[in-house]
Amino acid sequence: MMLRPRAFSLDPLWARPFSIYALSPKTISFFIQVAGRGTAVLAGLESGAALTAWGPLGNAFAVEPEKRTLILAGGVGLAPFPAYAENHPSPSRLSLVFGHRPPVAAYPFKEIAAVTQAEHFRERTPGDIETFISLLDARIRDFHDALVLACGPQPFLLSVKRLARKHKARLQISLENRMACGVGACLGCVTKMAVAGDSPEPVFANVQVCTKGPVFWADMVRLEGEEPWT
Amino acid sequence: MDLSVSFAGLTLKNPVLTASGTFGYGLEFVDYGDLRELGGIVVKGTSLYPRQGNPMPRVAETPGGMLNAIGLQNPGVEVFVRDYLPRLPWRETAVIVNIYACDAAEFGELAGILAAEEGVAALEVNISCPNVKAGGILFGQDPAMAGQVTEAVKARAGGKPVIVKLSPNVTDIASMARACEAAGADALSLINTLSGMAVDLRCRKPRLANVTGGLSGPAIKPVALRCLHQVRGAVKIPLLGMGGIVGAGDVLEFILVGAHAVQIGTANFLRPDMAFKIVRELAETCSRFCVDSWESFRGSLIL
């Protein structure tokens, strides 16, 4: 969904993109991390504040009820998964590994832990990243025949993608590129996606994350900072 | 009041068009409004061959505006004509194609292809995109070269109106306008984006991979109005004004300064129904400011 509170006036200019955190017949909820001016304004809105919203936009994570599914979330990347777990036909087949820096109580971890196998890892020092990547390595190895889903910061997705390739696991990732319009018009949020071409080498084209994603099979996209031969 | 407007052989049901590069091919917006309600749609900059555009990041938010360096990513004119044009309501709403090329001959070739398409109402010539290193900027900054491109397009446009889009990144926009008029342009649109730059202090990098980009949005409206005012005094051909329009009141400001029509650009990103909303609010805004005909109101700025 794109959210633009009236309080933005003309500055900040763009709406902000969020995944839906929870849905009921009367409410849509978002889990927002304050990362800059826009999210700070959103977080400070009073009840009843006017807001323009459009969506839902783009696609969603695959649901494969017959398969074990491993969810990997980094920080605010946890946001789409409580609803994913709640609506999954067999939540007992879901497992979650959640990495975070602020205390776990800042996140909706408890509610997802109530219905799935869930573990969390807090990064307190930069060195902890390596320990976390080892944990991801072990879990992806255990789940190499499962469906793996990941959402989080770009370096996290890059690590997860490398590990999934190492263990030949099927991985979907949700990209968080900056967006202006959310409807596929501005071409500001594109990512490199493999498209059918005449040559045996993969041909990559720029596709809009907002409408063609945000969820992609990891082996179909080339991430920022990824080796060109992958 | 009758909101329709005629100029350069075009008749539009209202003076509100969408600006190139901010409204895709129009089809991205069909869930948010009826394209037939718009005065016109200026589609994404189209080149002879497909272009992948610039590396990411391509957009950056700035105070009251944004920078972009998309680099004219587009599937090429053949795909536009085959896949997109037939799906647009061109019988009811003018479809204007913004064309981009790297030399006058290629501009002529593009014009020739589009001249054959019944669904194309007019051509808008992009001589001012600041993002692409080859070509673009030079045409828009040199009156003689802008004139050559205008002539090349006009010669192959088969009677379709040719609108030349002017860049504000020049010392004297009036001389650019005069050169295009003398070369046969049927109308001018202005302004394209202002060349700009933003940096990220924390990582000490430019915020666009292209380093520089085009500034648009409400931040540039005063520059757009100034350019429009100068060009209005320099040429007789009709003008399409744009730059920072976010409401029906802004539309009237541009018409007051002398525009026949306007284009909604960056505001389409504030909410996808923005252009439709501005059209809906236009009649009431005209009545609030006692505007009862475009003919009497246009250019009636009291100096």
Image: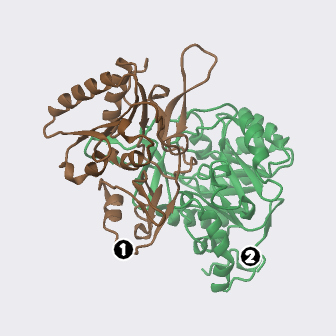
Whether residue B45 is situated above or below residue A217 in the rendered picture:
below
For residue B172, which quarter of the picture? bottom right
Q: Is residue B195 visible?
A: no
Residue plotted at (74% across, 68% down): B14
Q: Which chain is green?
A: B
Q: Which residue is mark 1?
A: A47
- Element on which disc 2 rests: helix
Quarter of the image with the C terminus of chain B is: bottom right
Whether residue A143 is situated above or below residue B122 in the rendered picture:
above
Query: Can marks 1 and 2 be said to lie on one chain?
Result: no
Whether residue B197 is situated above or below residue B9 in the rendered picture:
above
The x and y percentages for residue A65 are 46, 36
Which chain does the residue under circle 2 lie in? B
Amino acid carrying label 1: it is: Ser
Q: Colour of chain A?
A: brown
Amino acid carrying label 2: it is: Trp
Task: Judge left or right: residue A54 versus residue A141.
Answer: right
The x and y percentages for residue B144 are 67, 43
Q: Which residue is mark 2?
A: B294
Which chain does the residue under circle 1 lie in? A
The x and y percentages for residue A204 are 54, 26
Please state which of residues B253 and B248 is positioned toward the viewer in this rendering.
Answer: B248
Whether residue A171 is situated above or below residue B112 in the rendered picture:
above
Residue B147 has which mark?
Answer: none
For residue B41, which quarter of the picture? bottom right
Residue plotted at (56% across, 62% down): B224
